[in-house]
Amino acid sequence: MKRYSQLADLESLLLDIDDENIRAYAAEAIVSYSGGAYRSAIVSIWIAVVYDLYQKFRYLAETFGDPAAKICLKEIDKIRTHKDKKQVAIWERTILSQAFNDVKMLTSTEYNHLDRIQEDRHRCAHPVLDTEGFLFQPTPELVRTHIRTAIEVLLSQPPVIGKALSNALERDVEGKYFPDNLEGVRNFLIGRHLPASEKYITNLFIFCLKKILLDEPDDKNIIKRYMLVFECILEEHQEFFKAIDRKKIVEIIDKTKEDRYIFLSELFFIEQEIIFDATSGFLMEKLKSFATENHQKLDSVQYLIMTSTEISEYFIDFYSNMKLREKINFIHEVIKLPTITILNNDHDFITTIFKINLNILCDSSGLDDAEKNSQLIYPFLPILGEFLMLEEYSFIGEKLTQLENKNYMNNVINRILEYVDPVIHGLMISNKNRDTFNIIDTE
């Protein structure tokens, strides 16, 4: 019964192999293993490994123009067509080292695992005697391990892996005709880079993060493309991203170039849990300075404000100390933003800014001062209904009551009430509960 369950488990791995010929060789190895022909099983699985590497070389050379794969193929084809038939099998002995050293398809661990299969294949295919004069006899456990390793490490993997993966994606993303929208990127990746194994997806995440935060090129349009790739993959494989060693993510984020902080802030918004948590306290302090220094370019820092309470509070303190003209310019930047961003995603921030401005207006010392300070309020009026909640209208009511005591505020009060009345009416209808209001009667 144990033997049957092991066999069934191995056969299920065949479903992960796309190439029919390679799957046939792997199946032959499993049949040999089930029949106790352990040496034959190792020879068969090694043949599958060699053929798979050859096919992947060809795919990389023809589809992506990989220079290393082209050179290796040229050498292999030269050996295969050599007149001296004794030399024909030489390429089989070198293809694994070429995959590791030249094409960069394998990690050192993967190479070591596959190299062990190659060594045992030589022991099985030739009359190799041990010190006591016996032929090499692999154990069932060893054979099973070799079959499973070959399938999981190589045969079931997509053609573009390891260094070749990054080269292929780099050529695609940085090419002339790569799409610049999420839907276009999604369609582009499917069939070429997706679907793929967890290892492949993990490598994509790491590669994109490095390209976004620290690696060349510094072209903002190219970086935005990598942002789209990252976001697209995250939509489908968030669990793979969460499984990545957190230390590796921290190491990348800590190396973020200063001119890439804007992209880091967008990553916060796309993936608010892991990336934000992986940001060190030192980097967070630098992001605070970045947010305040770039306050006139709110589109560059809005994601920092939306995703970090710490930065939002720091920015509000900074705003409170701005000069009037700077405040007015900043408010106009806020209003210009699409409502889908900061207005809809950070209610507390916008409300706090509005309350600060209303307090400034109430403290006006005269008509001229009131006219200047009213510029902090007027831009908000058309969008009050987009960010103010019911309970906040009591605050407005109190402030309007204060303004009534100052005759020079009449024009300002009337202007505010033009917008406040309809908003209150709409909110009252939606809540169907007039008693929840604590605001002055404006009728």
Image (cartoon, helix red, strand yellow):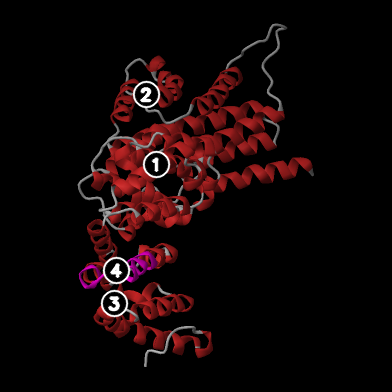
Q: Earlier in the sequence, mark 1 or mark 2?
A: 2
Q: Which residue is disc 4 drawn over?
A: 364
Q: Is residue 242 left or right of residue 297?
A: right
Gap between marks 2 and 3 measured at Cα:
63 Å
Q: Position of residue 284 (x, y in %)?
A: 44, 42
Q: Name the kind of residue labelled 2 in the image.
A: Asp
Task: Kindly report which numbered mark, 4 or 3, lies closer to the viewer in this rendering.
Answer: 4
Q: Residue at x 29, y 85 (%)?
A: 418
Q: Which mark is residue 397?
A: none
Secondary structure beneath dot 3 equals helix
Q: Is residue 150 magenta?
A: no
Q: Which mark is residue 209?
A: 1
Q: Position of residue 276 (x, y in %)?
A: 47, 47
Secondary structure beneath dot 2 equals loop
Q: Nearer the viewer, residue 425 or 227?
A: 425
Secondary structure beneath dot 4 equals loop
**Marks 4 & 1, CB-CB < 8 Å contact:** no
Q: Which residue is disc 2 drawn over?
A: 102
